[in-house]
Image (tube, rainbow, N blue to C red):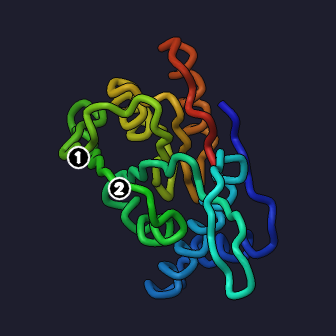
């Protein structure tokens, strides 16, 4: 699993806004939107493109578009804060939903809602979750996607705790499955 951290002063400034306990809701949402856009741009840096003919005011030319727009999968509820900006950057992307909570007795992730296509084979998937803490919900979500045939999974997190990253790496190795292509954050 490749972990990619965006090292940019504007990203660091927006993270500061998110982490400050004095930040008001509107400023928090604005910072989350900007960070989501930065994550999406970085996550699609090497995405395959295809040519598309266009006409400019001066001439015809060839532009590009993503060959396969990803399926956006926010982990509800926190991931909802990332959907609008990710979808604005990827307007051809479809959106699916997973709602994962924690069983208070077993402390294991449980799904309350899964609105996913049955077959994800060959489709790039971007999981949106602002915070990777212990990794439990993320491992559960990745497991759901893998069980439906997904193999090109990118996790977009604004903040990722070392424990969550370690849990995902250990889980991947013990399951012997294909890893998510990257965790961006």
Above or below residue 144? Residue 68 is below
Q: Quadrant of the N terminus?
A: top right
Compare marks 1 and 2 and give the one earlier in the sequence: 2
Q: Secondary structure at mark 2?
A: strand
Residue on which disc 1 sits: 115
Looking at the image, which is closer to me, 53 or 32? 53
Q: Residue at x 18, y 45 (%)?
A: 112
**Left or right of 140 in this view: 123:** right
* Number of callouts: 2
| Image quadrant assignment for residue 142 | top left
Q: Position of residue 93 (x, y in %)?
A: 43, 57
**Left or right of 35 in this view: 115:** left
Above or below residue 130? Residue 120 is above
Q: Secondary structure at mark 1?
A: strand
Q: Residue at x 57, y 73 (%)?
A: 18
Above or below residue 155? Residue 18 is below
Residue on which disc 2 sits: 95
Q: Position of residue 134 (x, y in %)?
A: 48, 40
Q: Residue at x 40, y 59 (%)?
A: 79
């Amino acid at each position: 699993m490749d972990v990619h951290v965006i090292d940019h002063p504007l990203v660091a400034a927006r993270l500061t806004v998110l982490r400050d306990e004095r930040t008001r809701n509107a400023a928090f949402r604005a910072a989350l939107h900007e960070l989501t856009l930065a994550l999406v741009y970085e996550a699609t840096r090497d995405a395959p493109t295809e040519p598309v003919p266009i006409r400019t005011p001066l001439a015809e030319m060839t532009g590009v578009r993503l060959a396969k727009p990803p399926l956006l999968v926010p982990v509800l509820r926190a991931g909802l804060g990332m959907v609008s900006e990710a979808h604005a950057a990827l307007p051809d992307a479809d959106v699916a939903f997973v709602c994962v909570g924690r069983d208070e007795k077993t402390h294991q992730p449980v799904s309350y809602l899964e609105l996913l296509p049955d077959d994800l084979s060959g489709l790039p998937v971007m999981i949106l979750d602002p915070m990777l803490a212990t990794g439990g919900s993320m491992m559960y979500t990745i497991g759901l996607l893998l069980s439906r045939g997904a193999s090109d999974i990118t996790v977009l997190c604004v903040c990722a705790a070392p424990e969550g990253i370690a849990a995902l790496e250990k889980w991947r190795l013990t399951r012997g499955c294909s890893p998510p292509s990257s965790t961006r954050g």
